[in-house]
Image (tube, rainbow, N blue to C red):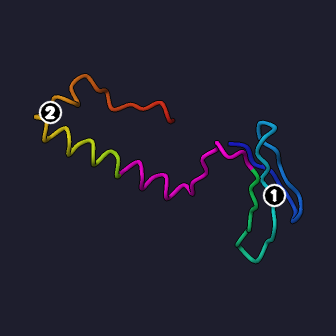
């Protein structure tokens, strides 16, 4: 993980297409502004985790209804890290 120090008004650029700017700092809260291309998907980490868990539960339900055939051969690993 990369750690950077930024002051309000300062930004970082990712892959020449995504800008993350420190808009405001109040106590322990930092307000960030993002500029990114329309094809980029941006989710808060807790929302992405909830979606991932819901998708896994749905897959397990469908697999159970299919008699366990859908999960046959699946290792449980994913390519999303």
Q: Secondary structure at mark 2?
A: loop
Residue position marked by numbered label 1 in the rendering = 21
At x 31%, y 27%, the residue is: 75
Q: Residues within 10 Å of mark 2 (few under 14, many from 20)?
A: few
CA gap between label 2 and label 1 equals 47 Å
- How far across and down, in percent of the image, does residue 33 sit? 76, 61
Instruction: Identify whether 73 is placed above or below 13.
Output: above
Please state if 10 lies on the left or on the right of 51 as rendered.
right
Please state if 23 lies on the left or on the right of 59 as rendered.
right
- How far across and down, in percent of the image, does residue 4 sit? 80, 50
At x 89%, y 63%, the residue is: 9
Q: Quadrant of residue 6?
A: bottom right
Please state which of residues 32 and 25 is positioned toward the viewer in this rendering.
32
Residue position marked by numbered label 2 in the rendering = 68
At x 77%, y 77%, the residue is: 26
Q: Quadrant of residue 78?
A: top left
Magenta stretch in the rendered image: 36-53
């Amino acid at each position: 993980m990369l750690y950077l120090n930024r002051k309000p008004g300062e930004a970082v650029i990712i892959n020449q297409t995504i800008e993350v700017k420190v808009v405001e700092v109040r106590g322990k809260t930092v307000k960030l502004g993002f500029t990114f291309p329309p094809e980029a998907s941006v989710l808060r980490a807790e929302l992405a985790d909830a979606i991932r868990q819901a998708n896994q539960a749905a897959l397990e339900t469908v697999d159970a209804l299919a008699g366990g055939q859908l999960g046959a051969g699946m290792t449980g690993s994913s390519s999303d890290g």
